[in-house]
C-alpha cells in the first residue's frame, strides 16, 4: 500500500515539474498531430474518390457519343473502367468498390437505363474483383491488369444478358466482346499509367500497394 501511494505521489510530483510539463506538452502535440494526419488522410481519400467519380462520368458521356453497336442494347465497352484501374493504385479496395458502384448508378441514371445499370454493375464489379486479385498477386503490369479488367467486364455483361434475356445464343458475341475488351483494356492501361502520377499528386493520395 505504501509502495502504491509512493509511486502515485511521485508521478503526481513529476507531472508538476518543468520536465513533467514539457513531457505532457510533447504527448499532447503528438496526439494532435496524429489527429490532424488522420483528418487529412480522410479528406484526401474523399477528394480522390469524388475526382474519380467525376472523371468516370465524363468518360461515360464520351463513350455514349461513340457510335459502336455491340449487338446487345445496354452493353458498353467500359471506357469508364479507367477510374477503377487508377483507383486501385491510390485508394483502398473498399473505396474503389464504392467508386465503382457510385459511378455505375450516377452514369446509368444520367446517360443510360435500367438494363445498362444492371450490365454495368455486373461488369464493373467483376472487373474490379479480377483486377484487385491480379494486383495483389504481383507480377502484372498496369496494362496487363487493365486488359484483364476489360475482358472480365465484358464477360460479366454477357453473362447477365444471357440470364436476363434468357438467350444462351448471346454467348456467340463473347469472342467479339473479348477482343473489344482487350483493345479497350490496352488503351485504358496506357492512359491510366500516364495520368496516375498527376491524379495521385493532385489528390494528395498515397499509392496503395496492398
Image (cartoon, grey):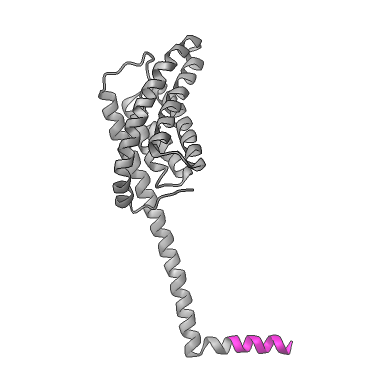
Q: Which residue is found at the position 31% from the left and 26% from the top? A: 111
Compared with 165, 86 (above or below) is below
Relative to 134, is 9 above or below? below
Q: Quick check: can you spot residue 107? A: no
In the rendered view, would you say 136 is above or below 15?
Answer: above
Which residue is pictured at 47% across the width and 41% down the height? Answer: 139
Q: Is residue 201 left or right of residue 23?
A: left
Residue 85 in the magenta stretch? The answer is no
- Image coordinates of residue 78 in percent, x first then y, are 36, 28
Is 184 displayed left or right of 140 in the figure? Answer: left
Tally of numbered discs: 0
Q: Residue at the location (30% across, 37% down)?
A: 191
Residue lying furthest front: 139
Seen at 29% across and 42% down, the residue is 194
- Residue 109 vs residue 167, the one in the foreground: 167
Q: Main secondary structure of the magenta part?
A: helix
User: Residue 193, can we see it?
Assistant: yes
Residue 13, image x, y percentages: 56, 90
Indicate the position of residue 67 as horizontal and vertical percent values: 26, 19
Range covered by the magenta-colored residues: 1-11
The image quarter in which residue 104 lies: top left
Quarter the N terminus occupies:
bottom right
- Please tell me which residue lies in front, 130 or 1: 130
The location of residue 100, given as percent across then percent down, is 42, 36
Was residue 8 drawn as part of the magenta stretch in this picture? yes
Amino acid at each position: 500500500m505504501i509502495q502504491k501511494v509512493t509511486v502515485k505521489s511521485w508521478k503526481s510530483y513529476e507531472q508538476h515539474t518543468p520536465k513533467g510539463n514539457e513531457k505532457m506538452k510533447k504527448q499532447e502535440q503528438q496526439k494532435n498531430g496524429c489527429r490532424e494526419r488522420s483528418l487529412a488522410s480522410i479528406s484526401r481519400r474523399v477528394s480522390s474518390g469524388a475526382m474519380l467519380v467525376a472523371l468516370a462520368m465524363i468518360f461515360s458521356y464520351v463513350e455514349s457519343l461513340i457510335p459502336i453497336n455491340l449487338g446487345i442494347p445496354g452493353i458498353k465497352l467500359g471506357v469508364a473502367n479507367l477510374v477503377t484501374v487508377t483507383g486501385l493504385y491510390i485508394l483502398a479496395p473498399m473505396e474503389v468498390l464504392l467508386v465503382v458502384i457510385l459511378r455505375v448508378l450516377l452514369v446509368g441514371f444520367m446517360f443510360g437505363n435500367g438494363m445498362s445499370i444492371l450490365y454495368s454493375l455486373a461488369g464493373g464489379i467483376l472487373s474490379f474483383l479480377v483486377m484487385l486479385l491480379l494486383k495483389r498477386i504481383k507480377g502484372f503490369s498496369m496494362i496487363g491488369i487493365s486488359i484483364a479488367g476489360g475482358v472480365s467486364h465484358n464477360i460479366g455483361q454477357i453473362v447477365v444478358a444471357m440470364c436476363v434475356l434468357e438467350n444462351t445464343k448471346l454467348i456467340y458475341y463473347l469472342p467479339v466482346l473479348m477482343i473489344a475488351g482487350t483493345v479497350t483494356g490496352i488503351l485504358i492501361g496506357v492512359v491510366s499509367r500516364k495520368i496516375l502520377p498527376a491524379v495521385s499528386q493532385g489528390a494528395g493520395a498515397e499509392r496503395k500497394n496492398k
